[in-house]
Amino acid sequence: MTQRDAVLALTAQRFDGGAFEARLARLVAVKSTSHDAAYASEIMRYFTDEMTPWLGQMGFTVEIHPNPLANIGPILLAERLEGPDLPTVVTYGHADTVLGMDDAWTCGAGPWKLQRDKDRWYGRGSADNKGQHAINLFALESVLEARGGRLGFNIKLVLESAEELGSKGLRRYVETMASRLTGDVFLASDGPRAAPDTPTVAAGSRGSFRFDLVVSPRSRKVHSGHWGGLTTDPGVVLSNAIASICDKRGKVLVRDWLPNGGQGPSPDIRELLRACPLDGGTDDATVEPDWGEPGLLPAEKLYAWNAFIVLAMKSGVPDAPENTVTPTGRATCQIRYTPATPPDTFLPALRAHLDREGFSAVRIEKGGVHMPASAIDPTSHWIAFAEQSLRRSLRRHIQVIPCTSGGMPGDVFQDLLGLPLVWVPHGHNSCGQHGPDEHMLVEIARQGVIGMTGLWWDMAMAGRA
């Protein structure tokens, strides 16, 4: 058995003995939601009572800094520096969660107590993101133990507490701390694998762009009997405007929004995703082959194409309808876009489209990027390094994807620090994040700690960028 094989076995033994479950249970028990200011002390407790002692045991120096923005949660910076000539990894995670939604849970013991049920660990943050950064740090412990307290590389951890608020303040913080956050590669974990049984390496993440469509032809409601059929109905106009943007099966009709001029993904990306599996979903959501862009594989739609979503829509008072023609209709819409699409083109293209289709009265309001897209070339050295290391450790196919489907703040580290991005997600699409019954699959966690142990072990031999 090689030293590398021995440290992988050590990690598996520690995991199977319950050490990881015990650690995750402690982290989940901290009610560190950023969606309720009343829990601000819990976020700080996550840093002071859980992360600082754990990181200190591994030889990190830990600092907790206030967020550059007022009334936003703090940011933890931990450094473990062994030498200026060694490779340096910048890693990331987020301590905050969405609301617990205590009364809506049907599985486990509620949001703030980790409980195993067969192949799942239930608890808020188990998948997003406490479990994911815990996997990476648990693996790091094994490498430190096997190498007698040394890693053979430097590592810097940024742990924020406002990711669920759109990572408010993170960009300004990293910009201020840029001289201390220099490195060779960004390596972190968030989001889902392509499929639960398929370890995945992502070269970036899709972005999220939001805007409102508004129709308001008058200042007050009017009687539907006297005015129906005579005056503009905002709900009708708004519905037709949306139908001009996207057809009844989800095909985007504003073709200027799409990557590669709407001609489909590039041949290289299509080959990368040709055999990519996808999470099959649940009773609540399944992959529908005929939804979205015709002619694309499901994986191409998810990782190499842009999607249009209506997040909310209102005209009148749905809970108490009145016999009136309402004065206003509003829809909040979203584009999930690939890093290949410049978001500053979205609103001009939409305005031109609406005018061309006869909807000049439809206003576009509150348009802007909610979470920027970011990515590197999926054939780059660092992506290949991670894929080869994971394949060697787990002895199975590793799926490389050009970007994850959800938004993540990799743009901050790419834009401000020039770091190549490598994401190794440990979640899955049906994990229940942002809703009740959030969970982590035990087998994904086990594979995660073994795979990340090998990746940390190999990092000492990665060389400088």
Image: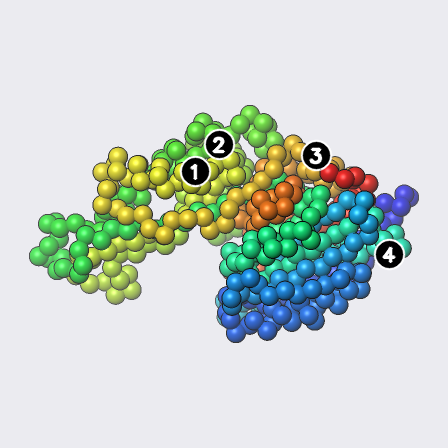
In 3D space, how far apart are the residues under numbered discs 1 and 2 (Cα atoms)?
8 Å
Q: Is residue 303 left or right of residue 400?
A: left
Q: Nearer the viewer, residue 432 or 142?
A: 142
In 3D space, how far apart are the residues under numbered discs 3 and 4 (Cα atoms)?
28 Å
Residue tagged 1: 292
Residue 157 in sight here = yes
Three-letter code for the amino acid on which mark 1 is drawn: Gly
Tell me residue 464's x, y (percent).
76, 39
Q: Quick one: label 4, few (<14), some, or many (20+) residues within 10 Å?
A: few
Residues under numbered marks 1 and 2 in contact, where contact means CB atoms less than 8 Å apart: yes
Q: Secondary structure at mark 4?
A: loop
Residues under numbered marks 4 and 1 in contact, where contact means CB atoms less than 8 Å apart: no
- Residue found at x 65% / y 71%: 45
- The disc label shown at residue 450, or none: none
Three-letter code for the amino acid on which mark 4 is drawn: Gly
Question: Going from the N terminus, do you reach mark 4 or mark 1 first?
Answer: 4
Residue tagged 4: 149
Three-letter code for the amino acid on which mark 3 is drawn: His
Residues under numbered marks 3 and 4 in contact, where contact means CB atoms less than 8 Å apart: no
